[in-house]
Image: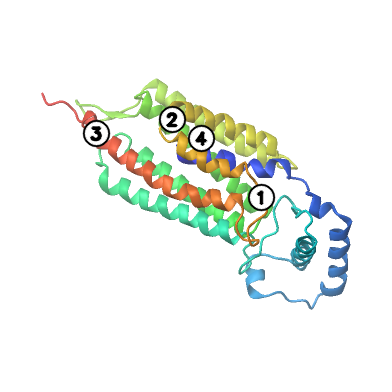
Amino acid sequence: MLCAYRWVLATLPFLVFVVASSGDRSSNFQNCVSACYVDYCHPQTTLSLALRLTRWTCTDDCKYKCMHMLTDIAIRGRSTIHQYYGKWPFWRLFGMQEPASVAFSLWNMYYHIQGWRQLRSRIPSDHPMRSYYLTWATVSINAWLWSAVFHTRDLPSTEKLDYFSAALVILYSLYHTVLRLFNQYPTRSCEDGRIQRTPVHLLWSSVCIVAYLTHVTYLSVLPRFDYAYNMAFNLTIGFTHNLLVAAFVALTTAATALELFDFPPWGRIIDAHALWHLSTAPIAKFWYDFLIEDSLDDGWRKPKR
């Protein structure tokens, strides 16, 4: 549930500034990049190993240097700090564009890895929801991994992997929540021990699989990523899920509210998006504790005959 709400808000800042921002549209920036390219980008130009490993080009490096040069001027002149290509100016570290968001994404991933281990060790192997919870933890780990990769380098490929992984978490959260709340999880027959699935379970599983594949296919075949549609898809699935499970909505709402109060990064390192990553990690621990307590509840035990 937690990831369903958090990932929806994660894409809000990129919806408005997706094509260009005031910084990269300015003539000063464009002239600076052009001059830098002419002066420094020659066949013999060699970037540092860290920049090469994170797939920076000489043009990218010129954009980075011009962005910070103009930001320095804006700070000294107490004028407006601009965004560039939809992002605030961040100091990079070992080629990472947003090192704070990378670190906090990995911190979230750590909590989900710990949660996966707890689910595996504490929930009985025959529990009907065990495999669904473990799968949810796995797709969450995958999502935070690609979040870290995306914040390391914002490229078309890393962007899609981040967004598609986030959509999978949101949709799977809704999927397993419906199974849990409406008792549509598979059960084992007392007579022959075979796994039994209701028609509703099969139908709901098919709907979710088709919805996700359609979502990914649509966004993959377009010549340009449809951010508005992606936002509408995530909001619809995320809010539907939160209507079903509301126990942690107050906490997650407070955390994701950071996404709505965008501001220039402190020290060009930490912005609202990074703080969002920072605040959501501890909430994941509480959610895993809830899943385990729910799974160990006496109500799951079969009555003795």
Crowd class of label 3 (few under 14; some 14 to 19; many from 20; radius 10 Å): few
Residue hosting label 4: 171
Is residue 267 shown left or right of residue 284? right
Q: Which of 58 and 240 is in front in this view?
A: 240
**For the residue labelled by badge 2, is the local secondary structure a helix, a strand or a loop?**
loop
Give residue 99's position: percent from left, percent from top: 58, 61
Q: Residue at x 58, y 35 (%)?
A: 234
Q: How far apart are marks 3 and 4 (CA)?
A: 26 Å
Three-letter residue code for mark 3: Asp
Quadrant assignment for the C terminus: top left
Crowd class of label 4 (few under 14; some 14 to 19; many from 20; radius 10 Å): many
Q: Given contact means CB atoms under 8 Å apart, are the residues at marks 2 and 4 in contact?
A: no
**For the residue labelled by badge 1, is the local secondary structure a helix, a strand or a loop?**
loop
Q: Given contact means CB atoms under 8 Å apart, are the residues at marks 3 and 4 in contact?
A: no
Residue hosting label 2: 246
| Residue 263 marker | 1
Q: Earlier in the sequence, mark 2 or mark 3?
A: 2
Give residue 170's position: percent from left, percent from top: 51, 37
Three-letter residue code for mark 1: Phe
Residue hosting label 3: 297
Q: How far apart are marks 2 and 4 (CA)?
A: 16 Å
Q: Distance between the residues labelled 2 and 1?
A: 29 Å
Three-letter residue code for mark 4: Leu
- Residue 169 can be seen in this image: no
Q: Which of marks 4 and 1 is nearer the N terminus?
A: 4
**For the residue labelled by badge 4, is the local secondary structure a helix, a strand or a loop?**
helix
Is residue 26 shown left or right of residue 84? right
Give residue 126's position: percent from left, percent from top: 25, 38
| Outermost residue to the front | 78
Quadrant assignment for the N terminus: top left
Which mark is nearer the camera, 2 or 1?
Answer: 1
